[in-house]
Structures are given as C-alpha cells and as structure tokens.
Image: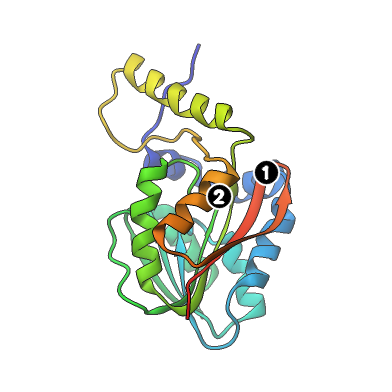
Amino acid sequence: MEERLEEMAAFFERRLGHYDSHMLEDILGAREFYEFTAGLLPKGPCRVLDLGCGTGLELEEYFKLNPMAAVTGIDLSEKMLGELKRKFPDRELELIQGSYFEVPFGEECFDGAVSVESLHHFTYEEKLGLYKRLLAAIKPGGYFVLTDYFAESPEHEKFYFEELSRMKREQGLPEGSYHYDTPLTLEHETEVLLEAGFAEVRHMRGWEANHTIIARKKL
C-alpha cells in the first residue's frame, strides 16, 4: 500500500526523536558534509541565516569553528527548534518558527546563509522567488552555502514532480506543502540561483546525490 503524504511540519514533528540519528547514519556522506558545510561559512563575528535549520546538525559543527557567530534559524517545526535551543543555550540564536517562503529576511543584514538537506522539496519557480529574497538579505560580497540532495537527470527531476502531483490527486489532498522529495538537478539549481541574481555559483564537493555549492553575491 502506498504511503500517505504528510504535511511538511507534521512530518518532522513526529520524527524528532530519531531525526539526528537518521540524518547522520542513513544519509550518504552526512557525517562529512555537515562538517564540510560548516567549514565554508563566515568566520569571526558575523550574522548567518539558516534556512530549514531543524535540530541544528550543521550548527553543531559551525559553533565548534566559530562560537562568535550569531545565527538566525527558520524552521517549520516548533519541536525541532526547541531541541536546537536546548543544544546551544549559550550561543547567539534567533529562532523563528515558520516557512522561509513567508518569513521576512530583511535587507543586507547577513554575512552569509546556509541550508542543508531542506530545499529539495520545491519547484524552480518557488526557489526563484526565495533566492531573490535571500540575495537581498545577504550583504555585498556575502554568500549562500547549499548542501542538498539533487536529481541525477532531468528525467528523474520530472518524474519526482509528476509523482507528487499524482499522489496528491489520488489522495484527495488540498494544495499545500507535503513531505515528498522533488529535487532539481544540480544544473537547474545552479540556473535558478544565477537567474535570482547571484554573481557566481560554484560546485564545491559531492557525495553521490548530495552536493555542496556556493552562490556568491557581487561586491
């Protein structure tokens, strides 16, 4: 029997107890890519925006390298944000429960931004609007580090989106955000970041389907 789609926030709320172990043990390359991603973020006193911060696995590594960082984290799950706050009682954290498609980011107030394993649920068009807002929120010369899961081909990318539409239709679900992986290809992710206005997008490293890229804002 096909698994029923779950609303995005509810999906993660229900899985808090084993979320960290699942991410670290079951996702290929995770024990490397969280540390690798953290090593690319700004050093010294700085402000960083984390999109879909969850329980802060990337921040565990980042605060080891830069305890002076001030981080604004946005996530749908209240329980995950609570766990993140519990982990780092002595760090400068602003935690916002909500959708990063709706929460205001501000203008040129972050030295950098990061997202790990969160953005592979959205369309090119949805990401285009998000990345334009993100670009405006990053200071000139700042950058966005994205580590995520990508489709291996345009055919696979199309298949994932068609499957999501089919499941929503057959399950009689209203429009909304549901947990189902719909990754873009690495090439399409690069294209949408450039179309949003980032001056340069650079591929840093890959772990089969997972990759890290940096999108820079011009000075």
Q: Is residue 135 above or below residue 42?
A: above
Q: Position of residue 110 (x, y in %)?
A: 42, 77
Residue at 64% across, 71% down = 40
Q: Quadrant location of residue 67?
A: bottom right
Residue at 69% across, 64% down = 35
Residue ID for mark 2:
117
Residue at 67% across, 41% down = 209
Tell me how far mark 1 sits from mark 2, CA to CA: 10 Å
Q: Is residue 111 above or below residue 74?
A: below
Residue 118 is at least partly visible in this image? no
Q: Is residue 56 above or below residue 15?
A: below
Q: Position of residue 77 (x, y in %)?
A: 39, 51
For the residue labelled by badge 1, is the local secondary structure a helix, a strand or a loop?
A: loop
Q: Position of residue 156 (x, y in %)?
A: 57, 28
Q: Are marks 1 and 2 in contact (CB under 8 Å)?
A: yes
How many marks on residues? 2
Q: Quadrant location of residue 37?
A: bottom right
Crowding at label 1, few (<14), some or many (≥20) Cα neighbours within 10 Å?
A: some
What amino acid type is highlighted by mark number 1? Ile
Q: Residue at the far left: name it.
A: 174
Q: Is residue 24 above or below residue 141?
A: above
- Tell whether 8 sits left or right of 208: left
Residue ID for mark 1:
27
Q: Residue at the far top: name it.
A: 1
What amino acid type is highlighted by mark number 2? Glu
User: Which of the marked residues, 1 or 2, is nearer the chain's N terminus?
Assistant: 1
Q: Position of residue 49 (x, y in %)?
A: 44, 69
| Of residues 214 and 201, the one drawn nearer to the viewer in this rendering | 201
Residue 111 is at least partly visible in this image? yes
Residue at 54% across, 67% down = 87
Q: Residue at the far bottom: name it.
A: 45
